[in-house]
Image (cartoon, coloured by chain):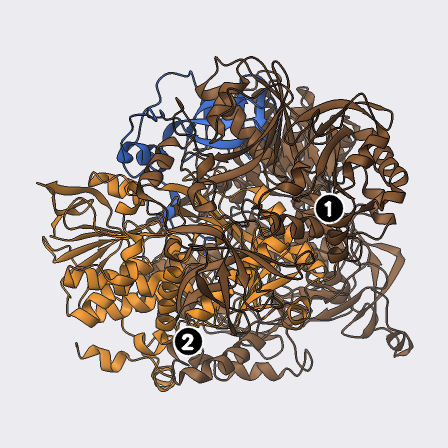
Chain colours: A blue, B brown, C orange
């Protein structure tokens, strides 16, 4: 249960929030081509690393809150903490490949 | 857990033949004998005993049979990890009998035996053991395929473990949230020191100990150590800032120090799950003694040094008569001293530090002799090994830290890659005298308090790590995983086949997959694998332990049910009048009051009232509400007059229908929006999302009013007359209050009631929204004042019949996850000549391309047949549509349906084939309008 | 076929003979140096990659193939899933596709000479409200039309199949009925992975563990090969068979995917004597459960609500899971949870996979499996092998192309997919 720093309510459990997606720009609905519009609808960066995203504080102030989150470690910091570096390659050192005494499913 | 009377009448219980005279640190209360049954036979023990110590005290040596080979097993570790001491206690399976306190009247039974512990049929598997090597089942039973289910049943019959009852009285489990500054996991010398130092710095501490008493290894120590324990325990007792939880365990460490603690030993509460957000976690579990791998290492009578020390010192149990001890460390030497003091004859002490070793233990149902590496054979009934340690780094792993193998210490050690707020203390980190361990704990506790904002702790001093001989396997092969019956030979064979990484060998042999989750077995597994592959232990890598640290009951995890139920204010009336409940998400609603068909007919002929409180209701205020409505609804809203209501359909950005409802304008800048019951929360979030992220400049404020109002729909030809009797201040005449208008007035003496003239049922009807606290009052007033008009309540089922007769769709029933408005017969509502509209581009493209499916009304040729909803509409075997809604219409005395069909079949008069679930095929005709009843809408416009 | 195969054939007789002689079995797959070039490189040694390699070799004689994995065989989603097999999907496309997979699974043990322990013990999807009962009926009707055994059954029959189930109307979420799918069941996932790996190896396919792809070479719109931590490899065909990393691997080839990666958690209890023969799923309660031959209950749930690459698992998952399992089977409260873990699921907007060609010639996809990947392993392997060998997209996977998103042709499986195990 990681925590999200809500600018209105302080540090709160993630269970109080709904993930509202990566921050992205909505194309002009009058002029968007199908490709542009559907890229907006369906395609995410889905980075393994720091991402900028929006959460809705559903069980709190009911504000949409921008944060930066590291999608591998789930570390969260406020949206205005410097530029979030993008990691567009498979992350090294994630435990998928590590020997593991308990990861097996029957 | 009552003792069967037959057992009480049977022979007197065996005497405590293996009990020693009083020991200085013993936990048992000799004045408090307890009786229990073991395997149906009466036994006794003492208050303070574990189940296993009580049995051992009366001379029991075989405690269970192993999983695969049904080998007899006794005490190995005398702790919660003991693989041979898992038992059925009453209706509770898999009880750790070497850790569970004995209670009076317990019904204790062995698991995994048939017909008895002593003569077990499954033990024949031992004879064929060489053919049942690890993974043997992958290599056989492939053919013939049809026999596999039979083989599978036989394999399944060998499933280990106890039995769970089919019915059980619900125990009480609860949960608690805690916000301590510091959680200390483990109350041995280091954990006690840490808790004391953290509390002294001003931190609030929760100290958690898995066993029943504080002290860890101090409990079985010498007089000085017992005195130290007394002193520490007194200090802890005196500290108001330390909350002590014994018989409890830190089960998991999750992100941001979210810590789960399982608390046991509570009165009237079976177990409690504590969820603690701690500023710092101190992990101080000590070390786990590691078994040695050699032939016969699982015979009853082979025990670890710590096991005999526990038995002698804590429970005054003599573990054997004549012992051989293999010692590689001071703990083993102390075990020798304890055994001597307990009067056990020491047949030989083999000092592994001088290269002495065992070869095998010999015996059938227990140790009879030990063969030593030098060729001697020594008669004995007890073989004690103290050959090394495992550092239980589990909680540190969960925090992301990686243990590393230290060949000099012959154990994995915690890495220094711990996140802030997680600290390790004591034996887990290094070696030392008990005084040094306490001092280390104190330093770590002070550092933990500093992390939590108390005092200025310094980095704790490093503990020495002593060299230790690397002993994993003797010259013979034996068990590596006792609960899974995996031997060192199995691991060698698996490695030779190519399952040669830690992960693959684990998966293939199932070593470390059993109830101890590798705490006893992991390091030996890796060591034997290293031997097999010619690699070093550190090359094979560390091991990652998954949560939980200790098994945790489903009951404790579940706690009490926290899933709320929502009722309207009129629920008590519904219940008193025989309403059948309908579960609709969180809401419980009246489905019907006995006869839905009659209720529907009544609405068409007279007047009915239905409780529609769950309808979502949102108060929208501000000058920019029309902009918002234009954006989220497909139709236009700019010109909605005060006092008018309008139907609207909402789409998501992909053009798919997400909700519908009516919105009315109550004042210049005041609107009330209704949503579907299930969509209420999602629509609110949807609106807030658009306002907050795309249009923060729009002045709109939204407040949810769903349960502020009780909502009642009054429907039927007499509804106007009924309302006229109880309404004040509103002219109900058709000209003054026509269809699709909203008025505010006084109903049954209640001010500020809203009245919408709308008609989901297709009848003249009014939806009343009255302050919730007056819901029952207005409901009863309607029934009383309208008695002579035939006013009666109707439920959701009658409403569904009525709306289907009228051809009104239900979003998510008559639409699905891909339905756009054009396909739902809502295309005429869509107005694309607006600046913006959620999902606009998709709607434009769909309008250009045309739809492939369309929602239509269908009439079965045989009106007595009601095709089940979701019946498929077919052409041959191809699916061309489906029935989305169907009911028998009391108004028309025939079945009525809505369905989606391919556009080519959607023309009125088309005849389609409906395949019923019972495989009959019937014909149905596409109707010209969605409405079966009153397509012109005359009834609701009167 | 190499001669070693004859002596290495698995059988009861072989077990007996080796038991007597104490001779080890030959390696299940061999180790190789990485060659500079292959006819095809498959990224990911999970069930999809291995099955593709096996069918390429076995059906199309295409053996100069390397399967690369950054870790070990079957260590990703293929070794972390709850191994439930079924074909009772909602759309005809989905039903046909997964039915082919079930058929392949049924004969897989014999075909691979490796017992994959496919246990067709029946699969129940519970309905707790009339909406989900309607969806169950919908699935049953589509299934029957496609020749798949599915039927809606009532509480009495459910109680007969699962005696521990609380089917009383007083339950917080009363059970109104269920979709019963007799051919559904469970399988030993590791055995499937190893069986495919062993059979592919025997046919000449090279499996390279601990070989991580760190780049994909694309020139002039055509894939040329991959860069690995063990050096470069050239190949005219590169197939992305990864799960969890599908969008990151595709990004190396410049192909953006409509994928969001979510953890899917699972857990297992201590073993108890067999009491649950059927696989039980409740979509409303976000839980599915089955009991293994070893006596453990294996639980799964829906994916975590937010995307993440973290596989650490959460406490709230186990709390909700336990609460809902006890709502279904109240008497098992004393059963203890032994271990929880997580895998990564690549979720697509329509809960259906992305299979086939991409704008980069020769760079192929078999990704976006969400929570359904293991069920589809054999049929995905068979169809992707056919695509690689013939250059033509098989009809069975035509609906799953990447272009459907840009063209607005989503697959209608989403309705039934909230928790579809």
Helix, strand or loop at label 2? It is helix
Residue depicted at x 44% and y 20%: B694
The chain that hosts pointer 1 is B
Determine the CA span between mark 2 and mark 1.
53 Å
Residue depicted at x 29% and y 39%: A90
> B201 left or right of B852?
right
Foreground of the two, C136 or A56: C136
Residue depicted at x 73% and y 46%: B588
The quarter of the image holding the N terminus of chain B is bottom right
- Asked if residue C134 can be seen in this view, the reply is yes
> C222 left or right of B92?
left
The quarter of the image holding the C terminus of chain B is top right
The chain that hosts pointer 2 is B
Name above or below for residue B461 compared with residue B372: above
- Residue C3 coordinates in the image, percent (x, y): 18, 79
- Residue C361 coordinates in the image, percent (x, y): 14, 48
Foreground of the two, B696 or B770: B770
Q: Residues within 10 Å of mark 1 (few under 14, many from 20)?
A: some
> B258 left or right of B496?
right
Foreground of the two, B200 or B328: B200
> B810 left or right of B17?
left
Which residue is the site of mark 2? B136
Residue B588 is labelled as 1
């Amino acid at each position: 249960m990681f925590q999200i720093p809500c600018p209105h309510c302080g540090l709160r459990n993630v269970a109080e929030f709904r993930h509202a997606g990566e921050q992205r720009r909505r194309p002009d609905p009058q002029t968007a081509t199908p490709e542009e519009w559907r890229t907006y609808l369906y395609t995410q960066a889905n980075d393994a690393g720091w991402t900028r995203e929006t959460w809705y504080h559903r069980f709190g102030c009911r504000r949409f809150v921008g944060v930066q989150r590291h999608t591998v470690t789930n570390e969260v910091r406020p949206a205005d903490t410097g530029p979030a570096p993008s990691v567009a390659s498979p992350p090294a050192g994630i435990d998928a490949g590590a020997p593991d005494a308990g990861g097996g499913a029957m | 857990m009552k003792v069967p009377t037959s057992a009480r009448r049977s022979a007197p219980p065996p005497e405590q033949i293996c009990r020693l005279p009083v020991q200085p640190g013993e936990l048992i209360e000799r004045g408090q004998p307890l009786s229990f049954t073991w395997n149906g036979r009466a036994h006794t023990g003492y208050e303070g005993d574990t189940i296993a110590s009580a049995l051992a005290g009366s001379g029991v040596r075989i405690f269970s049979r192993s999983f695969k080979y049904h080998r007899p097993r006794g005490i190995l570790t005398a702790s919660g990890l003991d693989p041979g001491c898992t038992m059925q206690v009453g209706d509770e399976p898999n009880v750790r009998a070497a850790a569970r306190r004995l209670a009076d009247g317990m019904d204790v039974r062995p698991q995994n035996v048939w017909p008895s512990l002593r003569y077990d049929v499954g033990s024949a598997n031992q004879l064929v053991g060489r053919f049942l090597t690890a993974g043997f089942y992958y290599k056989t039973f492939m053919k013939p395929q049809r026999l596999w289910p039979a083989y599978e049943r036989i394999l399944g019959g060998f499933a280990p473990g106890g039995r769970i009852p089919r019915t059980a009285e619900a125990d009480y489990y609860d949960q608690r949230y805690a916000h301590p500054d510091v959680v200390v996991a483990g109350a041995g010398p280091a954990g006690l020191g840490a808790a004391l130092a953290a509390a002294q710095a001003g931190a609030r501490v929760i100290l958690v100990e898995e066993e029943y008493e504080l002290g860890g290894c101090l409990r079985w120590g010498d007089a000085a150590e017992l005195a130290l324990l007394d002193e520490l325990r007194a200090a802890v007792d005196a500290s108001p800032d330390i909350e002590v939880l014994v018989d409890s365990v830190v089960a998991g460490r999750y992100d941001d120090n979210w810590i789960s603690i399982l608390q046991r030993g509570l009165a009237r509460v079976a177990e409690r799950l504590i969820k603690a957000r701690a500023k710092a976690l101190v992990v101080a579990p000590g070390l786990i003694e590691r078994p040695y791998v050699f032939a016969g290492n699982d015979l009853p009578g082979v025990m670890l040094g710590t096991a005999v020390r526990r038995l002698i010192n804590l429970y005054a149990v003599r573990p054997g008569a004549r012992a051989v001890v293999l010692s590689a460390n001071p703990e083993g030497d102390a075990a020798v001293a304890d055994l001597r003091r307990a009067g056990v004859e020491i047949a030989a002490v083999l000092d592994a530090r001088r290269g002495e070793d065992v070869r095998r233990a010999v015996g059938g149902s227990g140790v009879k002799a030990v063969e030593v590496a030098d060729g001697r054979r020594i008669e004995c009934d007890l073989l004690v090994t103290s050959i090394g340690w495992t550092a239980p780094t589990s909680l540190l792993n969960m925090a992301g830290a990686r243990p590393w193998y230290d060949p000099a210490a012959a154990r994995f050690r915690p890495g220094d890659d711990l996140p802030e707020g997680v600290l390790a203390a004591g034996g887990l980190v290094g070696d030392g005298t008990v005084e040094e361990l306490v001092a280390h704990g104190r330093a770590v506790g002070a550092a933990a308090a500093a992390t939590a904002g108390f005092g200025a702790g310094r980095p704790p001093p490093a503990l020495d790590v002593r060299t230790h001989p690397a002993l994993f396997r003797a010259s013979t092969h034996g068990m590596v995983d006792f609960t899974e019956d995996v031997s060192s030979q199995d691991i060698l064979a698996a490695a030779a086949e190519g399952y040669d990484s830690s992960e693959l060998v684990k998966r293939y042999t199932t070593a470390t997959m059993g109830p101890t989750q590798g705490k006893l077995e992991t390091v030996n597994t890796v060591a034997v694998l290293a031997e097999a592959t010619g690699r070093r232990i550190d090359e094979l890598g560390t091991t990652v332990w998954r949560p939980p640290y200790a098994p945790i009951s489903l009951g404790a995890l579940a706690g009490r049910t926290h899933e709320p139920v929502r009722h309207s204010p009129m629920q008590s009336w519904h219940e008193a009048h025989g309403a059948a409940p309908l579960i609709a998400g969180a809401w419980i609603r009246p489905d019907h009051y006995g006869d839905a068909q009659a209720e529907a007919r009544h609405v068409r002929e007279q007047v009915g009232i239905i409780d529609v409180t769950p309808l979502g209701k949102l108060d929208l205020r501000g000058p920019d509400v029309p902009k918002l409505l234009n954006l989220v609804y497909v139709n236009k809203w700019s010109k909605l007059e005060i006092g008018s209501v309008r139907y609207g359909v909402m789409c998501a950005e992909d053009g798919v229908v997400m909700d519908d409802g009516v919105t009315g304008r109550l004042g210049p800048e005041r609107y009330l929006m209704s949503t579907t019951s299930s969509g209420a929360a999602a629509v609110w979030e949807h609106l807030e999302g658009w306002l907050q992220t795309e249009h923060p400049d729009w002045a709109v404020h939204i407040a949810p009013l769903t349960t502020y109002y009780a909502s009642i729909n009054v429907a039927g030809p007499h509804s106007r007359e009924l309302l006229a009797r109880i309404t004040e201040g509103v002219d109900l005449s058709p000209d003054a209050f026509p269809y699709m208008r909203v008025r505010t007035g006084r109903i049954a003496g209640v001010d500020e009631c809203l009245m919408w003239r709308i008609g989901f049922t297709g009848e003249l009807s009014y939806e009343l929204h009255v302050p919730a606290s007056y819901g029952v009052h207005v409901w009863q007033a309607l029934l009383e004042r309208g008695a002579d008009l035939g006013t009666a309540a109707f439920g959701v089922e009658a409403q569904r019949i009525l709306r289907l007769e009228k051809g009104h769709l239900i979003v998510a029933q008559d639409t699905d996850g891909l339905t756009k408005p054009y396909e739902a017969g809502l295309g005429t509502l869509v107005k694309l000549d607006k600046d913006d509209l959620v999902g606009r581009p998709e709607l434009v493209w769909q309008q250009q391309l045309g739809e492939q499916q369309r929602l239509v009304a269908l009439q079965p040729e045989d009106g007595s047949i009601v095709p089940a909803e979701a019946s498929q509409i077919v052409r041959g075997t191809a699916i061309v549509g489906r029935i989305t809604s169907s009911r028998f219409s009391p108004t028309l005395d025939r079945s009525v349906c809505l369905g989606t069909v391919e556009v080519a079949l959607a023309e009125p008069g088309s005849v389609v084939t409906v395949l019923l679930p019972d495989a009959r095929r019937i014909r149905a005709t596409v109707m010209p309008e969605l409405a079966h009843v009153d397509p012109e809408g005359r009834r609701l416009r009167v | 076929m190499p001669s070693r195969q004859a002596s290495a054939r698995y059988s009861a007789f072989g077990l007996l003979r080796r038991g007597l002689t104490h001779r080890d079995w030959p390696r299940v797959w061999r180790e190789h140096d990485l060659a500079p070039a292959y006819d095809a490189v498959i990224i990911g040694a999970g069930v999809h990659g291995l099955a593709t390699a096996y069918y390429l070799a076995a059906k199309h004689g295409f053996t100069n193939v390397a399967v690369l994995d950054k870790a070990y065989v079957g260590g990703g989603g293929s070794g972390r899933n709850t191994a439930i097999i079924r074909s009772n999907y909602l759309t005809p496309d989905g039903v046909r596709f997964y039915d082919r997979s079930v058929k392949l699974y049924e004969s897989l043990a014999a075909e691979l000479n490796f017992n994959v322990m496919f246990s067709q013990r029946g699969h129940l999807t519970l309905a707790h409200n009339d909406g989900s009962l309607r969806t169950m009926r919908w699935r049953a009707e589509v299934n029957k039309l496609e020749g798949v055994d599915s039927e809606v059954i009532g509480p009495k029959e459910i109680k007969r199949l699962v005696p521990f189930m609380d089917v009383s109307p007083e339950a917080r979420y009363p059970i109104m009925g269920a979709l019963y799918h007799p051919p559904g069941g469970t399988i030993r996932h590791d055995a499937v992975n190893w069986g495919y790996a062993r059979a592919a190896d025997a046919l000449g396919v090279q499996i390279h563990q601990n070989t991580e792809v760190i780049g994909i070479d694309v020139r002039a719109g055509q894939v040329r090969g991959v860069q690995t931590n063990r050096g470069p490899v050239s190949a005219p065909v590169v197939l992305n068979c990864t799960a969890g990393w599908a969008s990151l691997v595709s990004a190396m080839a410049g192909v953006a995917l409509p994928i969001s990666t979510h953890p899917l958690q699972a857990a297992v209890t201590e073993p108890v004597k067999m009491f649950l023969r059927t696989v039980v799923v409740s979509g409303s309660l976000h839980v599915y459960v089955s009991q293994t031959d070893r006596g453990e209950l294996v639980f799964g749930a829906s994916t975590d609500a937010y995307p993440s690459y973290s596989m650490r698992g959460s406490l709230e998952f186990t709390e909700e899971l336990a609460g809902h399992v006890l709502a279904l089977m109240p008497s098992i409260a004393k059963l203890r949870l032994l271990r929880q873990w997580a895998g990564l699921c690549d979720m697509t907007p329509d809960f259906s996979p992305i299979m086939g060609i991409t704008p980069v010639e020769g760079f192929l996809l078999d990704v976006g499996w969400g929570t359904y990947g293991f069920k589809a392993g054999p049929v995905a392997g068979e169809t992707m092998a056919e695509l690689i060998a013939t250059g033509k997209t098989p009809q069975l996977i035509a609906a799953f192309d990447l272009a459907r998103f840009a063209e607005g042709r989503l697959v209608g499986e989403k309705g039934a997919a909230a928790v579809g195990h």
